Amino acid sequence: LQDMATEWKLDPVEAALRILTEGGIEGPGSSQRVASFNMDKADVDLFMQQPWVVTASDGSNGHPRQYATFPEKYARFVRSDGVITLQDFIHRSTGLTATIMGLRDRGFLRAGQFADVVAFDPRTFAPKADYANPRVLSTGVAYLLVDGVPAIDGGEATDVRAGRVLRHVPPAGSCP
């Protein structure tokens, strides 16, 4: 915001208002966005402890959540602040999400299920993406299998694209 304010020769409040009302440098409909950091930590911590809260991302282009949702949740709410347990983090990132979405063949390590598995180092699993560099890969992932095919092998990304779009409408009443 300070960079935009300096470029436009405005104070930061006026620059923020310009972005909100005019859409930034490019005008209405531009890709310029404002990130708001106005949530109370105690409220967010309490929300994270609710048994129905699952991990997901609404990150748009240029938002670090596209690359760092899960590592950010782990690093902050499990490792750093101890708001939720590792078991809760894993279940709410996998099985509970699949259950809510009605995906019967995903989300759990069971025979006959799709093998979507991540093996991470709990000491180094952390986000690296931020607002200035939103497409930086996280650290600490040793292996990632998508449909049983390695997408990360020994900490290195492979060129394999085993994922696919799941076209699905959850059954009515499936969300808690």
Image: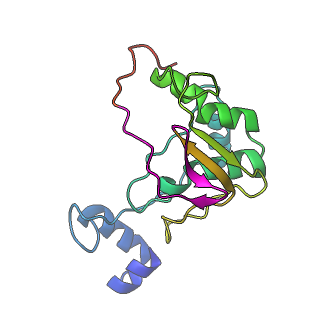
Q: Position of residue 64 (x, y in %)?
A: 50, 59
Q: Would you say residue 151 sits in the magenta stretch?
A: yes
Q: How many marks?
A: 0
Q: Would you say residue 150 sits in the magenta stretch?
A: yes
Residue 47, image quadrant: top right
Q: Is residue 9 visible?
A: no
Q: Is residue 52 above or below residue 8?
A: above
Residue found at x 52% / y 18%: 176
Of 8 and 100, which appears nearest the observer? 100
User: Is the stretch drawn in magenta largely helix, strand or loop?
Assistant: loop
Q: Is residue 65 above or below residue 133?
A: above
Q: Position of residue 163 (x, y in %)?
A: 44, 43
Residue 86, image quadrant: top right
Q: Residue furthest top?
A: 173
Residue found at x 25% / y 65%: 30
Of 12 and 175, which appears nearest the observer? 175
Residue found at x 43% / y 46%: 58
Q: Position of residue 13 (x, y in %)?
A: 41, 71
119 sits left or right of 107 in the view: right
Of 168 and 79, which appears nearest the observer? 168
Q: Which residues are magenta?
A: 147-166
